[in-house]
Amino acid sequence: MTDRVRCYDCGNDYELGEQAHCTCGETLWLETDVGDFEWPGGGIDDSWRYADVLPTVERVGVEPGGTPLVRAERVDAFAGCQVSLKVEGCNPTGSFKDRGSAVGVGYAARAGYDWVGTVSHGNMALSTSAYAAAAGLECAVFVPSETPPERLELIARHDPHVFRVEGDYGQLYADTLSLEADVAFVNSDTPLRVAGQKTTAYEILEAFAPSVPDAIVLPTSSGGHASGVWKGLRELERAGLIDEVPRIYVAQAAPCDPIATAYREGRGTVTAVDADETIAVSIANSDPPSGTRALRAVRETGGGAVSVTDDETRAAMAELATTAGISVEPSSAVALAGVRKLSRDGELAADDEVVTILTGSGYTERLQTDVGQRTRTIDLADLETELDAIVGE
Ligand SMILES: [Zn+2]
């Protein structure tokens, strides 16, 4: 596999790391020679099974990927279609970010870097610092100054250097990629991270093979994951392993939905929006660096972009927890809320097979403070009568 990157839009190519963006302003991804790639066969254990189509890296940390794909029939009524759930919360640090961190940090380790860095106040910071720790590398994490202490505590567990930055967060993301510092930045839409994240699509399609799902729906922030899924599908089509490409739908929270806004307005590029607060903090990105690439992904696959209210997200989060037994963070629930909306809008049919990517676990953050209506305090002496009263209800 080469270490050259190519602009998805105009096709210009560069050495990896030579520049952050194409001269046309659009984003870059690694060139991949799929050659005569075949499904590896056997159980889908982890994402290194696709090493032939990934950059050569030092393997560090716990293997990412190999996450469950659950055919969740009990969620069909809510979703309005035949829904399968890709449970990315089962990755080592609880989110899909581990796929890209393993590749990005592993590449930095092989290239002889002492430092890696990232710009994130959530899952990516946690994931990057975990893989850096496993590689014996120092890690610099840049977070917005207002990041709450409970999030900092999670990020700090793997002992990175955390910089709370005052100033524009979108600008910070771009600025880190043009720094002269000897730090390998693995931000959310950089080519190595996107390469790792394409393995979500590989796993889904290998699980379905030789069939193909009708659609893949995922929550979208920077557009890096959607870009990775699109890249994966394109490669699999090129390798002759799929005849049809599933439609990609991106789901966003209505208070902060720049990609869905551009889609609704029929525009070809994504621009920044004035965002409001949302419970889906992990995907609240008002100026997504790969937004336009994500928009292209949905258009070229015949999919779309949808946004949902926080109340719709809460309903989907409760549905997943109480019907499928899966706790997800609000940003992941946005995807299922999006599926429901797409079904109601007639975009998805009742017999469509739809994979919903649940990007992150709900167990890595406190989602609410109440203990639930089914929690009660009883006296030990009343154990049997209390239980009888409930079981008999
Ligand atoms: Zn270009």
Image (cartoon, rainbow, N blue to C red):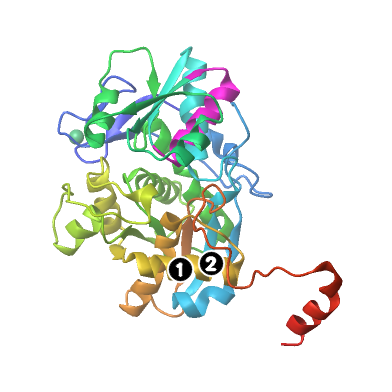
On the rendered image, what quadrant is the N terminus found in? top left
Tell me where residue 299 appears, x and y as whole percent. Answer: 25, 58
- The residue indicated by pointer 1 is 316
Viewer-proximal residue among 350 and 6? 350
Residue 175 seen in this snapshot: yes
Q: Quadrant of residue 379?
A: bottom right
Q: Where residue 320 is drawn, which disc sits there?
A: 2
Q: Quadrant of residue 169?
A: top left
Magenta stretch holds residue 253: no
Residue at the image position 42 percent from the left and 35 percent from the top? 193
Q: Are marks 1 and 2 in contact (CB under 8 Å)?
A: yes
Viewer-proximal residue among 40 and 56? 56
Q: CA distance from mark 1 to mark 2?
A: 6 Å
Query: Which range is magenta?
Result: 121-138
Q: Give SS at disc 1.
A: helix
Tell me where residue 264 appears, x and y as whole percent. Answer: 18, 64
